[in-house]
Amino acid sequence: MSLISQNAVPKELKKKKRDSKKDEIAPVGEGQEEAEDGGAVVDLEDVKNQKRKRVRKEKDEQMEIEREKEMKRLENSLFGSLDKVDNTAALFFTDRSANSAVSVYEEDVDMGGESDELEADNQRKPVWVDEEEEKATINIAKVNRLRKLRKEEDESVISGSAYVSRLRAQHIKMNPGTDWARPDAHSRDYNSSDEDSDKESEVVVATGFQDAEDILRTNEDLVLKRSAKLLPGHLEFSRLGDANLKDPSNAPVNSVQFHKNAQLLLVGGLDRTLRFFQVDGKKNEKIQSIFLEDCPIRKAAFLPDGSQAIVTGRRKFAYSFDLVKAQVDRIGPLAGRDEKSLESFEVSPDSKTIAFLGNEGHILLVSTKTKELIGTLKMNGSVRSVAFTNDGQQLLSSGGDGKIYHWDLRTRSCFHIGTDEGCLNGTALCTSPVGNLFAAGSDSGIVNIYNRDEFLGGKKKPIKAVENLTTKVDFVKFNHDAQILAVSSRMKKNSLKLIHVPSFTVFSNWPPSNQALHYPSCMDFSPNGGFMAMGNAAGKVLLYKLHHYHHA
């Protein structure tokens, strides 16, 4: 124990010796880790950091040099060498591909001996050359049709190759290609103020447009429109939702009519309710209904000007409903008349006169303004139907004597009486809104179609006798352009026929075989022909879309 304690060195003394040795030790060099005495350890952190910085710097310099070399290589490959310029190379050259084919062929002929030099350029070389073309000669002055190939008046004989080139040039001249299909065609400058810019850029403007930009502003004249003529045989139509689906009638519907705006539909029937619907073919919303307690409706119709609706029943009076004021006024009983019913009537196209059918062949003319009787007309037999002409100055009537009367409303006198062929009792009349046709139906189910001018001239035979109905004809109706005539009878199911007027043939697919019309009682076409509404005895108003007509 004593030996150990005597030789022991204090800790503080050891620490001082180590510090003094560190101070005496000097680094041998870069990367040397130990001193010469073999025991002292040098701080390696600083040495490693210096190495890393030096290596990183060398790498960055190398990458920068490589990046500059790559950029120069790309520039040379894309734009050519910018450092060296070949003074012998041409500064400009002619791009022959931009010229038309005509100029190419003509230049080939003119240059003649320079063809070898042109072939050395970037021109397309022929796959095969006929050697005999060079040897052959053609006299273009001898043949009349080849004289147009001459370049000079006294030119006559040319070589075969020149002849081929001129023929090709002439062909392209006579049959120019489509500009928009050629990639070298010049696009039009739409901002140019030159008046002849259209001609210079060879832009052909369609008829009806001021410039090519107008074509992009509308598709009106670019869409293929249907022919104005309705074709016979097959009628294109589709069934829509019932027009009175929102409020169906509990009794037979006796009247349907479209307002002149084509959106408002009037429906009246024996349930004594007058209904108005907004027809769009989808929802057909109900607008208003009017209940007439003492008048089961036999007929209801708008005035042509759309201001009022006339409603009648089997009564001595009628009603007038003002659409603007929403006010109902009574018409009649008429002074000096003892008619028990004013259920049948027609309104003049000028909306000034209402013609009621009276007793014993009397036709009662009532003013729509004063609602008073302004005149009467008297037939020899009973009156069953009347119809105004387009101008509203004449009136046609038929009845129990089988004759058709023509009345002049200005003088209130009859100026012509003609016999309706094969008719014993006339039951329906209608004049066409276009042309001079009129249709007359009878209780035998026959509908005769006449030309009014020929009928007034003494021709008794009708243009066409429609015999598709077997029971009494209750109504006939032309559409707005007189291409369709509807004839119907209330006494038989599905007895509604549509006739193609220009050909006087019945549409074969009407009535539809898979849809029941029930007992048709009334119908009407919309003002532009797009819709057709039909009321029946079941209280429904069937609505159809006629595809030939684009507007309602």
Image (cartoon, rainbow, N blue to C red):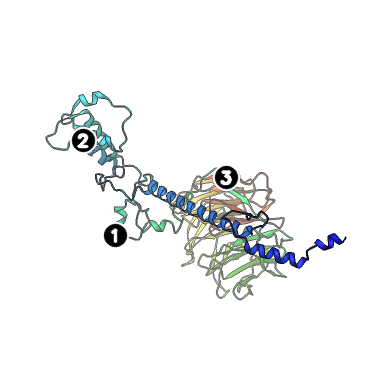
How busy is the neighbourhood of tag 2: few (under 14 within 10 Å), some, or many (20 plus)? Answer: few
Q: Quadrant of residue 467?
A: top right
Of circles 2 and 1, which is in front?
A: 2
Residue 299: which numbered mark, if any?
none
Q: Is residue 520 left or right of residue 191?
A: right
Say which element carries label 2.
helix
Q: Is residue 398 visible?
A: no
Of circles 3 and 2, which is in front?
A: 2
Q: Is residue 113 left or right of residue 478?
A: left
Q: How many marks?
A: 3
Residue 15, compared with residue 127, is above or below; it is below
Residue 195: which numbered mark, if any?
1
Coordinates of residue 241 in the picture (x, y in percent): 67, 55
Residue 507: which numbered mark, if any?
3
* Quadrant location of the N terminus in the rendered image: bottom right
Say which element carries label 3.
loop
Q: Amino acid at mark 2?
A: Glu
Report how far apart the C-alphas of labels 3 and 2 lie in the structure.
Answer: 76 Å
Coordinates of residue 538 in the picture (x, y in percent): 72, 55
Q: Amino acid at mark 3?
A: Phe
Report how far apart the C-alphas of labels 2 and 1 lie in the structure.
Answer: 42 Å
Q: Earlier in the sequence, mark 3 or mark 1?
A: 1
Coordinates of residue 461 in the picture (x, y in percent): 49, 46
Q: Earlier in the sequence, mark 2 or mark 1?
A: 2
Residue 393, compared with residue 116, is above or below; it is below
Residue wearing tag 2: 114
Q: Nearer the viewer, residue 298 or 129?
A: 129
